[in-house]
Image: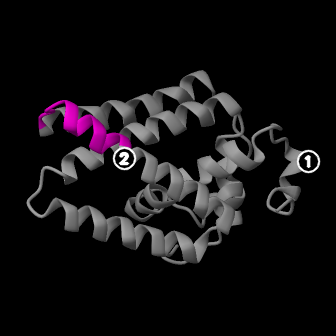
Amino acid sequence: MNVFRVDFDELYRRHLRRHSQFGLNVLHFIAVLGVYFALYGIAFALPGANWIVGGLLGAYCLVLAANVPIRVFLVNSAVVGGLLAGFLQVRELWTIPVWAFVVIMLASHRFQLFQHKVYNRELDMTEFNSKYRKGPTLFVLLAIYELPILLNYLVFDGARPLVESDELNVGQQQ
């Protein structure tokens, strides 16, 4: 597992094994936006924040550009840019302490985990469990690619639920 070089279609198929329900993906998208918003708040509290945020977003874009379909990259860039613009607007209106962004990030993450109790449909993960083992590498991999995966599903592929017989066709529609 290399976070800088991934097979996006395979990673997307893995995602769909646990996240094939539209409502779950919508709620995960909202939770991920909450995490990103909180990360902006924490980053902008640091000295040299503009350089830090700019550098991290630049590196993020380079990694995604090399690994995701162009249409997903463009939608992802628009969402991340729009969220940044929204954050900067909120920052102009309110002074929010850094600890509040930590709370927002933790609450967003817990919200994301809770959703699996409501949307609990999963398909067999055997094919992916040996390659994508739980741990720090998978955490970083998902931190980088979860938003593009969710956007790929919601914008381009979410109209139909995945069933076992359809899985072989995922990714071939592009």
Q: Residue at x 38, y 33 (%)?
A: 108
Name the kind of residue labelled 1 in the image. Ser
Residue 96: in magenta span: yes
Q: What label does residue 85 carry, if any?
A: 2
- Mark nearer the viewer, 1 or 2: 2
**Left or right of 71 on screen, residue 61:** left
The relative height of residue 70 versus residue 13 in the rendered view (above or below) is: below
Q: Residue at x 63, y 26 (%)?
A: 119
Answer whether residue 78 is visible to the viewer in this image.
yes
Residue 87: x and y in percent read: 31, 42
**What's the residue at 80%, 37% (across, down)?**
159
Applied colour scheme: one colour
Q: What's the magenta region? A: 86-97
- Is residue 41 one of those drawn in magenta? no
The answer to whether 91 appears left or right of 148 in the picture is left
Location of residue 31 by image quarter: top left
Q: Earlier in the sequence, mark 1 or mark 2?
A: 2
Query: Which residue lies under the disc numbered 1?
Result: 165
Q: How many marks?
A: 2
Between residues 112 and 46, which one lies in front from this camera angle?
Answer: 46
Considering only vertical position in the picture, is 15 above or below 120?
A: below
Residue 126 screen position, x and y as percent: 69, 55
